[in-house]
Amino acid sequence: MEKNKKVVANMKMNMTIHDIGDYLKKINPNVKSKDVVICPTSIYIPYFLKQSYEVGIQNTYLYDEGAYTGEVSPKQAASMGVKYTIIGHSERRKYFLEDDLVINKKILEALKYDMKVILCIGETKEEKSLLRTERVLNKQITRALSDINDISNIIIAYEPIWAIGTSVIPTKEEIFKNVEYIKKVIFEKYQRDDIMVLYGGSVNEKNISDLCDIENISGFLVGGASNDADKFLKIIKEVVG
Ligand code: PGA
């Protein structure tokens, strides 16, 4: 696997403030790396700031301020010291009907405030079975990054939708092949071979050591297993050291 590997926790809509207290008691003294990015439910973000790891947000809006009830803008998140935003997660695409156009606008807005964008892409089970994975990945990348010339702050997370929260993960060869393809698309468009590509989907403390063998990935986006401090610490230890 590549150097400076990252581990990103996508905690989703989990935990109460009581659980967060217990979680931080284990995480704060043990996580001393800026290559670890924790993205809690946004209401809890202030409890995670000013530690030795980085903090991210699970979603940011496409405008900087105004009458958009319930949304958080990248301008606001950045003003708090939040460095990363996850955009285009399959759950946002599915449950909040975010399409590539909205995703592109959200990325453009986040980049204005120097946030690092973790752009999630990945195929459904059906698309995979119809051998459309590459076509889907290409379309998602091209549309999400439309009108974006500088991709220095873009990190791609390859998350096959059928592997998210299912305990089913692709073979290492499949992940390697699809990550190579993503890198090829980026290289053809931007002549850059230094963009980080993470893998996400059912990563846990048991499979992490095996997944670390995949040479072309730069780290992991961890959902379910990141909500359990002990499991997450094991994953961090394996990836970041
Ligand atoms: P999972 O989620 O690790 O629970 O599969 C990953 C994600 O949704 O980013």
Image: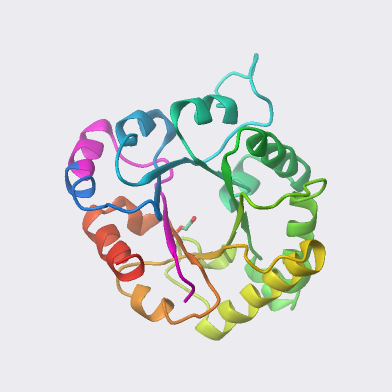
Q: Give coordinates of residue 43: x percent, y percent.
A: 40, 28
Which residues, given as a range, are shown in magenta? 1-24
6 vs 232, left or right, is right
Residue at 36% over, 73% down? 208
91 lies above or below 76: below
228 vs 200, left or right, is left
Residue at 80% over, 69% down? 188
216 vs 223, left or right, is right
Quadrant of the drawing holding the C terminus? bottom left
Residue at 60% over, 44% down? 92
Does the magenta-highlighted stretch encompass residue 20?
yes
Residue at 81% over, 63% down? 189
20 lies above or below 117: above
Q: Give coordinates of residue 9: x percent, y percent.
A: 40, 52
Which quadrant of the view contains residue 224?
Answer: bottom left
64 lies above or below 223: above
Of all residues shown, which one is farthest toward the top?
A: 67
